[in-house]
Image (tube, helix red, strand yellow):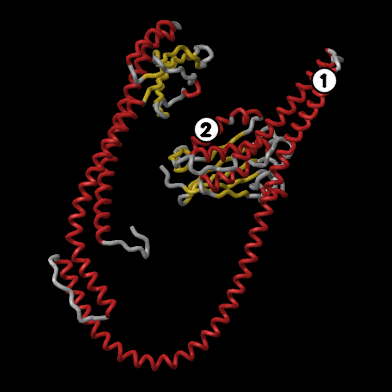
Amino acid sequence: MPRYGQTISIKKALIRTVILITAFCLFLSVSVSTYLDIAKQRTITINKLTTYADIIAFNAQVSLLFDDENTENKRLIAFRAVKEIKNIHIYKIDDFTNETSFFTSYNAPNTPPIPVKINKIKAPFTPESIGNHIDVIRPIMFEGIIQGYVYIRGDLSALNAYIKDKLIIDISVAFSVLIVVFILSLRIQRQLSNPIERLSTLVQGVSKNKNYDIRAPHVNVLELNQLSHSLNVLFSRTQAQLERQKKDEQEIRLLNQNLEEKVNLRTIALKEANQELLNTLERMHQYQNQIVENEKMASLGQMVAGVAHEVNTPIGLGVTGSTLLKDKLTEIKSAFDNKTLTSKQLSRFIDDGIENLELVYRSLNRAAELISSFKQVDVNQDTESYLMININDLINEVLLSMKKDINLNQHQIIIECPESLYIQSKAEPLRQILENLIENSLIHAFDEITSGIITIKVVIDEGQCQINYTDNGKGVPRNIRNRIFDPFVTTRRGEGGSGLGMHLVYNLVTQAIKGRITLNNTSSTGVNFIITFPIDGRI
């Protein structure tokens, strides 16, 4: 639609409307048809690869039981005739250790091998599309027990080529239809626009010359003929109204003369008041800008100081190590040039060089880790879409991934969350928030406690999800409670802490999931974080 104040002719509007409606209908029809066809072809390809995987799994039962790799390789070679299959892996589960290991594989001609996919094998075995290929994993069952897995990588190049050809044909047909519709629209708009242009010229002449005696002619279009009649009535009434207006203007002119004096006096007083108000507002804006600028500079100074403090130590150690190594190298070169170099001196140089190089490596690696942690503070909000998430399962997955650190000191984690609670949000930011909170408790709150307790309570209230996170650790020092979400605020400065964990949590809550986080610091021991963020629904 044109913006306010922008004009458009009936010719263009008519053609544009017809073209847009036609284009929309074509786009909707082509999109639905293409989507259904693509979905059907993709389903056929996936079902075909799944069937092949089931056949391979059935045939591989005996090979896995008797560890007969040669027989299975001969079977797999028969799949050269299947162009959709590029790679096949067979994995075996050890009867004693229950560990999954690589058994054998097949690669199609002119197809490079792929790395083993042991880490990717997990239930449910759902086909997964990645780029131009699709991965299918099926279990190898024998008497109801899983003996191993079959992994197939299928090629989607033929399907993508089919999709491309179909799109080209559909677009060509749609473009041809639009050309035909455009030609027909031109013929229709000529039949309507010519009478309208004549009426427009008539109205412009009346508006310019103020001659309301002119009358609009009769036209063949019913609606336009009604418009002509209405214009004629309007012209006649306007002429009569102008005559009455002249009489009224004389009376109003006399009244205006008396009002002008009063308006002038009040206008002067109002101008003076407005000027004083403008001066006051200008001063307020200056003060406000100054305050904002001061806060920005203070925050920037704290951030720069934190970065400099964290990075300066490893870089300084690296410079020291490289300087010592340079000095030792100069001594060795001088002894070598003077032919006084001894084996003992060379051995000592090698030992010192290794020690200095290890110091430089550790320092540079620490600096790299710090830079990596700085980058994590930038939370990308567009990399993940909203999905239906079982919040209880998500919390259990986080605890399972951190099971080793939690069980190391026999810490206890209590979850108060309904098992069937689903929310629509972003899974990865929520996972990172929980991991950082738990890690923060393990490192800071329980550094002197071997059996701490963490409580995670989840409730839903009026479309909002609230996560109440509590631990019984030593709490947050009073001097940093109000700055706990600021970058580089840490109680373990010089002990490996960067002070970015809670700042990352704050960014994830406020930016990624559009929520808010607060620290309830009423207690002197332990912490209590309350996270609230919006959701779209609950199953």
Tell me what residue is drawn at x 75 percent, y 27 percent.
359
Q: CA distance from mark 2 to mark 1?
A: 57 Å
Near-viewer residue (7 or 133): 7
As drawn, the label of residue 297 is none
Reading the chain from its start, which is encountered first: label 2 or label 1? 1
Eye-nearest disc, 2 or 1: 1
Tell me what residue is drawn at x 53 percent, y 40 percent.
429
Where 73 falls versus 424 (above or below)?
above
Amino acid on which the number 1 mark rests in the picture = Ile
Q: Taking 125 as reference, is 248 left or right?
A: left
Q: Tell me the residue that label 1 is attached to.
A: 332
Q: Quadrant of the N terminus?
A: bottom left
Residue at far front of view: 337
Q: Position of residue 125 (x, y in %)?
A: 41, 25
Q: Contact (CB < 8 A) between labels 2 and 1?
A: no
Near-viewer residue (117 or 475): 117
In which quarter of the view is residue 470 placed?
top right
Where 238 falls versus 258 (above or below)?
above
In which quarter of the view is residue 254 placed?
bottom left
Q: Position of residue 134 (x, y in %)?
A: 39, 26
Q: Position of residue 509 (x, y in %)?
A: 55, 46
Where 53 falls versus 62 (above or below)?
below
Amino acid on which the number 2 mark rests in the picture = Glu
Q: Taking 355 as reference, is 211 left or right?
A: left
- SS at mark 1? helix
Near-viewer residue (261 or 506): 261
Classed neighbour count for the residue bearing mark 1: other residues with Cα under 10 Å, few (<14), some (14–19), many (≥20): some
Q: Tell me the residue that label 2 is attached to.
A: 397
